[in-house]
Image: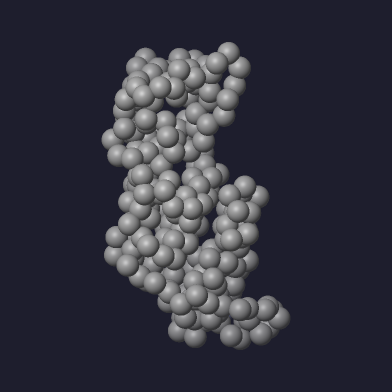
Amino acid sequence: MQVSTRGIILRQTKTVNDMRMLTLFSEQYGKISAAAKNDNFRGKLKSSLAIRPFTLGRYELYKNRDGYRMGRSETLRSFFGIGEDIDRYMEASFVLEFTDKILEENAPAPAIFQLLTDYFDALERRTKEMSFLTTVYQIKAVNILGYSPRLNECVHCGKKGEDFLFHVESGGAVCRECAGDNGLIYRSDSDIIDKIKFISRSSIKELEKLYLEKQALDEMNDLIRRYTRYHLDISDLKSETLLSEK
Ligand SMILES: [Zn+2]
């Protein structure tokens, strides 16, 4: 059976017999593995372009009982600006690896697909503080996947209020009494909760011109990394090491 879908390559590995295995995030079928001939990667053929990273492509796939095989591909949009800047490149590489980890194979995830495209689009235009967009991406992905932190009431006692602390392991906001009772140590305050709420209800487009002070940015980045590590079991990303060495 032959199918056609838009997609973004998450990863590729060389295998035997002049073949490669591609991990493709397809719009229609979610994350899939597809075998491709090395020829597809060579030369200046128009079809070879869609296999570069940070490219939105259209892919023809042949499905059989062993899985997918890659046919022709064409570039719909190449996000050149990402590959040309080291900060953008590292952030986008991290996001590809993160996305690879959060997706299950053969499970369509159209909202994440749209989010990833919007992220590339915004990242290509952004001129500084690239990591803010990455944090935005992660918060939105967490929400789409159903792991949103609870922010409107205390996770422990259910009390509603404003002056809350964010506790990663508890999964969201905690009031000061519960925090005291449990002897929990927090670095984050209600200000960061307001920021996460704001990010959650705004589109990437609305956020792409927003800049945080360095301390707030570092705190947000750290918080969302710890949150995804604890709640989504996302850890040991190769690209994360690169980012933390910056
Ligand atoms: Zn409480």
x then y, percent, for residue 211:
39, 72
Against 107, residue 213 (above or below) is below
> Please, which colouring scheme is shown?
one colour
Against 61, residue 229 (above or below) is below
x then y, percent, for residue 150:
49, 68
| Quadrant of the drawing holding the N terminus | top left
Against 93, residue 50 (above or below) is above
Q: Is residue 235 left or right of residue 23?
A: right
Q: Which of the 4 image quadrants contains residue 123? A: bottom left
Q: Residue at x 56, y 78 (%)?
A: 188
x then y, percent, for residue 136:
43, 61
| Quadrant of the drawing holding the C terminus | bottom right
Q: Residue at x 51, y 39 (%)?
A: 104
Q: Residue at x 50, y 28 (%)?
A: 22
Against 64, residue 97 (above or below) is below
Which one is in front, 231 or 59?
59
Q: Is residue 114 left or right of residue 41?
A: left
Q: Is residue 230 left or right of residue 75?
A: right
Q: Is residue 218 left or right of residue 84?
A: right
Q: Is residue 60 visible?
A: no
